[in-house]
Amino acid sequence: MTAHRPNWKHVAWAAAALAALAGVFMLYTRPEFLINMADQLWSCF
C-alpha cells in the first residue's frame, strides 16, 4: 500500500483559508473595528 501524498493545490487553498480566518480574528480583537462594523450594520436599518 502506498502512502497518500497531499495535493499541493489543496494544501495551498487550505493555507489561504486559514490565513484569511486568522486575519478576520485579528480584526475582531480591535475595539474600533467592532464599533465601526456595528455602526455600518445599524445604518442599514
Image (cartoon, rainbow, N blue to C red):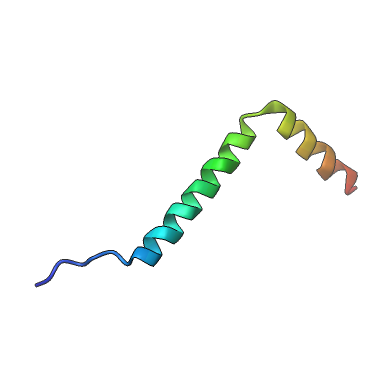
Which quadrant of the structure image shows residue 23?
A: top right
Give residue 39's position: percent from left, percent from top: 84, 37
Q: Identify the residue at horizontal 47%, vertical 49% (top origin).
A: 18
Q: State which quarter of the image contains the N terminus.
A: bottom left
Q: Identify the residue at horizontal 76%, vertical 39% (top origin).
A: 37
Residue at the bottom extreme, as displayed: 1
Relative side of 1 to 10, left or right: left
Give residue 45's position: percent from left, percent from top: 90, 47
Q: Does 14 appear above or below 2?
A: above
Q: Does 13 appear above or below 24?
A: below
Q: Does 45 appear above or below 1?
A: above
Give residue 36's position: percent from left, percent from top: 79, 35
Q: Does 39 appear above or below 12?
A: above
Relative side of 39 to 5, left or right: right
Residue at the left extreme, as displayed: 1
Which quadrant of the structure image shows residue 26?
A: top right
Relative side of 19 to 33, left or right: left
Which quadrant of the structure image shows residue 33?
A: top right
Residue at the top extreme, as displayed: 31
Q: Identify the residue at horizontal 48%, vertical 54% (top origin).
A: 16
Q: Identify the residue at horizontal 63%, vertical 36% (top origin).
A: 27
Q: What is the count of numbered marks? A: 0
Give residue 14's position: percent from left, percent from top: 43, 57
